[in-house]
């Protein structure tokens, strides 16, 4: 019997044309990815825009370094937080999960509100 390890997540601080954060969930054999124009929400009540971008290969989860000028995403990338997550709900336009990271812990949601635009926030503590 194979024991499956929990899926992982990473948040990469990306100093490209503009500073933003790339939030990635290991899901369906890829990293589902969203760009956050502002820092990730650490407390409930803080909502962040999360723009869905193209999926990335899973091996990108540990990437830190510089992306050369003239290439897509050019700039410096550093890992801001990483860990595992427990998927609670996944349906069209809504993903609920429990993050177990170094900086982010708790129940978080991604809710689509328009095309590629989602809201990313921490659920209120009960």
Image: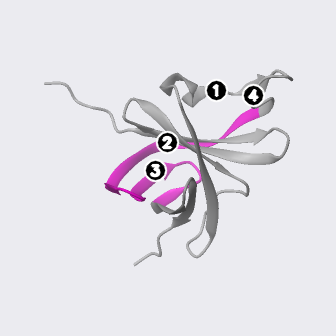
> Do residues under tags 3 and 2 come within 8 Å of each other at their CB atoms?
yes
From the image, which quarter does the C terminus lie in? bottom left
Residue at (64, 61) in percent of width and height: 49
Relative to 13, 101 lies left or right: left
> Do residues under tags 2 and 1 come within 8 Å of each other at their CB atoms?
no
Relative height, residue 83 to residue 40 (above, below): above
The residue wearing badge 2 is 83
Residue at (46, 62) in percent of width and height: 109
Q: Position of residue 86 (x, y in %)?
A: 35, 50
The quadrant in which residue 40 appears is bottom right
User: Gap between marks 4 and 2, in whole Å?
Assistant: 26 Å
Q: Closer to us: mark 3 or mark 4?
A: 4
Q: Tell me which numbered mark, 3 or 2, is placed earlier along the sequence.
A: 2
| Residue range (magenta) | 77-106
Q: Secondary structure at mark 3?
A: strand
Q: Tell me which numbered mark, 3 or 4, is placed earlier along the sequence.
A: 4
Report how many numbered discs are placed on residues in the image: 4
Relative height, residue 2 to residue 85 (above, below): above
Q: Position of residue 83 (x, y in %)?
A: 49, 42
Instruction: Give the main secondary structure of the magenta stretch.
Output: strand
């Amino acid at each position: 019997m194979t024991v499956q390890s929990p899926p992982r997540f990473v948040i990469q601080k990306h100093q490209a044309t503009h500073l933003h954060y790339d939030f990635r969930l290991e899901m369906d054999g890829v990293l589902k990815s969203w760009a956050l124009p502002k820092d990730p929400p650490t407390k409930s009540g803080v909502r962040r825009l999360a723009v869905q971008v193209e999926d990335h290969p899973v091996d990108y989860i540990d990437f830190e370094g510089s992306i050369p000028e003239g290439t897509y995403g050019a700039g410096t990338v550093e890992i801001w937080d990483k860990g595992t997550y427990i998927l609670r709900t996944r349906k069209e336009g809504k993903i609920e999960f429990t993050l177990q990271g170094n900086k982010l812990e708790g129940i978080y949601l991604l809710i689509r509100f328009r095309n590629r635009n989602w809201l990313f926030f921490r659920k209120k503590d009960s």
